[in-house]
Image (cartoon, coloured by chain):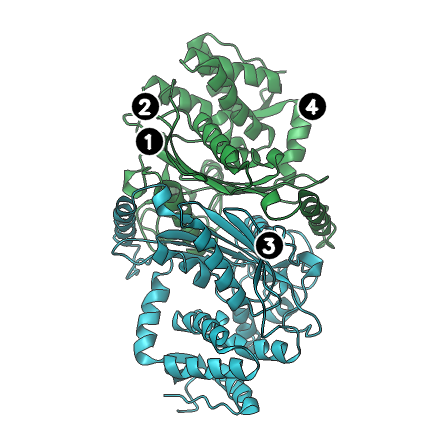
Chain colours: A cyan, B green
């Protein structure tokens, strides 16, 4: 490992074993730890580093502080034939989300659409992981969550009342890969502003506002301010509605009730989600649907390209291609993240080795 | 009416009577005509002029050309307890959408979520009109449609393969107004580029590309090119997925199958939609949900404001306030639209009077 390289390459299995071991040592059952690790590592494999092992240190901190329950009893609190409210018992968001999506898929098996709302959960990582769970069942999967930090203001506001709330929709295809939308509602990732602040370079004026709610190109002011929503008022409306969908059907925290995942280690977060599934077979013969999806995907991919564009990607395709590559080559972990993981490992006596 | 004013003020009832009369004279039944007019006028009342009576002339053209069926037999082609596929029989999109949403609401009455896909429909106007239909039933309403024109390219593409596909989600509240998201996936409305081209003023570089797929600030080139999606690749993914949701569950037209609503009067469009409803009572006691919604809405509205901001609006609030005003004062109709409506009226012997 050269100090000049910004990344450390770690094999998928090494990273999985490390994370699972850490979670078990902190009190999580092996079954749960395996499931949670699956979601984390999948994000890193797909290059969605913001929702992978970078989060392990804060999860460990929150588990140690007693504000995440390592042994949750996730239960259906209320249900109809096609809906349920799942109480996550303050467990790890990944485990709660997997269980809730399993309930939705089960309820949809007779050909019904099904929706499951969730309360008393925690940050669940990548929304697409749960939407994708529906795909092998020939169902469209839908996943909404409220974010674990209020980073955004209502349009025109000067106080963070809204998370950068992500959602995902996954559609099965036939021979082609599934189409997987997974987006949050800000114009830029906050990490890019952190980098600009370090480099002292100005940022585009649609990335963030300063603390008074006016747009800024100064990354230092931006970090004291708020993230700007995609398309201005459109993104504000979108993040607000995703937040409401994720919380109002279950009694999860919204707005001023949302605590800061990193800065408030004194209370559980009561994060909410909403999951939905639409079984293809209720609407169309699966074979016809899949043939049409494949045709649509190929048409999009084969669209004449703008100058300099090498390839047109479908939503989720780039991530799957990257995952295939990283499964072979190992996963690049940012050096700062590597150091944090080492620290977590040292505290618990677990070693993480790079390739 | 002074020639200097860009608008003509028309009373809600006059406009309704005119549209209904026109639709009846073109062969649509009074019941259908009333329902269709309700959707059109509501859009104008809300200031969503792009989906109101501005569309009447093209609807009349398409009805006259025989590519919209004035007397459709809208039927459920396939169903389960909680899903249906509705065949619109090539009827007016507004009528088909109202019927399909009624099916969804009916199927959700026992406390189930319900989704209804639609094929053989046409341009349906404002997506929010149908999502809002769920609100008086204490249900969350969801409405997706594919657009009637391909205006957008896949990200990196140089050929229009995608509509600027809109969607709407409407959430009931208690004493407050419902929260209604209604958005399409482009950064700007195409109408703004038309205005800039007339005024010979440059446009921001994130509104559109020229015909080769490269971004442009020249509105004339932009009109020959493609609309740019909100947030770049995010908006591309969003419009693609909305298009797929609206068509793949029913066999409606997608991609190269989509004909041009204005330029191709030789064929029916086979437009597709998808509607969904989530009954609150399946998840939470309605009173608790409404109390929490009201609290959330008030918190958002009362957020400290950025300098110069007079008021923070909730999604859909501005539109409802405008509708209340226009119900009293009459609806401002753009003079060019007024002239087109007069022409339609003259052809059919119907008079539209301004106030």
Q: Which residue is mark 1?
A: B269
Residue A124 seen in render = no
Query: Residue A199 or A187: which is nearer the viewer?
Result: A187
Image point 66% across, 73% down: which residue?
A67
Q: Position of residue A313 (x, y in %)?
A: 33, 58
Query: Residue A194 or B211: which is nearer the viewer?
Result: A194
Q: CA distance from mark 1 to mark 2?
A: 8 Å
Q: Which chain hosts label 1?
A: B
Marks 1 and 2: CB-CB under 8 Å? yes
Q: Which chain hosts label 4?
A: B
Q: Which mark is residue B328?
A: 4
Q: Which residue is mark 2?
A: B67
Marks 3 and 4: CB-CB under 8 Å? no
Q: Compared with residue A275, is residue B144 higher up or lower down, i.e. above or below?
A: above
Marks 3 and 2: CB-CB under 8 Å? no
Residue B319 seen in render = yes
Q: 10 Å neighbourhood of mark 4: few (<14), some, or many (≥20)? A: few
The answer as to whether the residues below labels 3 and 1 share one chain is no
Q: 10 Å neighbourhood of mark 3: few (<14), some, or many (≥20)? A: many
Q: 10 Å neighbourhood of mark 2: few (<14), some, or many (≥20)? A: some
Q: Compared with residue A70, is residue A296 higher up or lower down, i.e. above or below?
A: above
Q: Which residue is mark 3?
A: A243
Q: Position of residue B57 (x, y in %)?
A: 43, 22
Q: Which mark is residue B336?
A: none
Q: Secondary structure at mark 2?
A: loop
In which quadrant of the rendered view does residue A89 lie? bottom right
Query: Residue B68 or B295: which is nearer the viewer?
Result: B295
In which quadrant of the rendered view does residue B226 lie? top left
Q: Secondary structure at mark 4?
A: helix
Please report whichever mark, 1 or 2, sits nearer to the chain's N-terminal start.
2
Q: CA distance from mark 1 to mark 4?
A: 37 Å
């Amino acid at each position: 490992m050269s100090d000049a390289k910004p990344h450390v390459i770690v094999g998928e299995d090494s990273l999985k074993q490390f994370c699972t071991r850490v979670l078990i040592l902190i009190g999580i059952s092996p079954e749960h730890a395996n499931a949670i690790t699956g979601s984390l590592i999948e994000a890193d494999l797909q290059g969605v580093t913001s929702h992978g092992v970078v989060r392990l240190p804060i999860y460990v901190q929150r588990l140690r502080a007693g504000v995440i329950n390592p042994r949750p009893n996730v239960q259906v609190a209320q249900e109809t034939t096609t809906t349920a409210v799942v109480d996550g018992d303050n467990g790890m968001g990944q485990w709660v989300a997997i269980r809730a999506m399993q309930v939705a898929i089960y309820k949809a098996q007779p050909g019904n659409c099904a929706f499951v709302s969730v309360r008393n959960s925690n940050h669940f990582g990548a929304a697409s992981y749960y939407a994708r769970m529906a795909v092998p069942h020939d169902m469209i999967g839908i996943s909404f969550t409220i974010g674990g930090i209020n980073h955004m203001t209502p349009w025109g506001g000067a106080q963070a009342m809204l998370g950068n709330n992500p959602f995902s929709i996954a559609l099965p295809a036939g021979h082609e890969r599934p189409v997987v939308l997974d987006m949050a509602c800000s114009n830029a990732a906050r990490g890019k502003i952190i980098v600009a602040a370090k480099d002292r370079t100005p940022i585009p004026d649609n990335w963030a506002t300063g603390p008074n709610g006016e747009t800024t190109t100064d990354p230092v002011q931006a970090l004291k301010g708020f993230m700007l929503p995609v398309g201005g008022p459109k993104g504000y409306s979108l993040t607000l509605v995703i937040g409401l969908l994720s919380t109002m059907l279950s009694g999860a925290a919204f707005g001023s009730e949302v605590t800061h995942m990193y800065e408030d280690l004194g209370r559980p977060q009561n994060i909410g989600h909403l999951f939905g599934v639409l079984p293809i077979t209720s609407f169309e013969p699966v074979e016809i649907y899949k043939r049409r999806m494949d045709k649509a995907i190929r048409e999009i991919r084969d669209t004449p390209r703008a100058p300099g564009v090498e390839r047109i990607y479908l939503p989720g395709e780039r991530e799957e291609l990257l995952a295939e590559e990283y499964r072979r080559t190992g996963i690049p972990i940012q050096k700062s993240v590597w150091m944090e993981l080492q620290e977590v490992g040292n505290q618990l006596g677990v070693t993480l080795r790079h390739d």
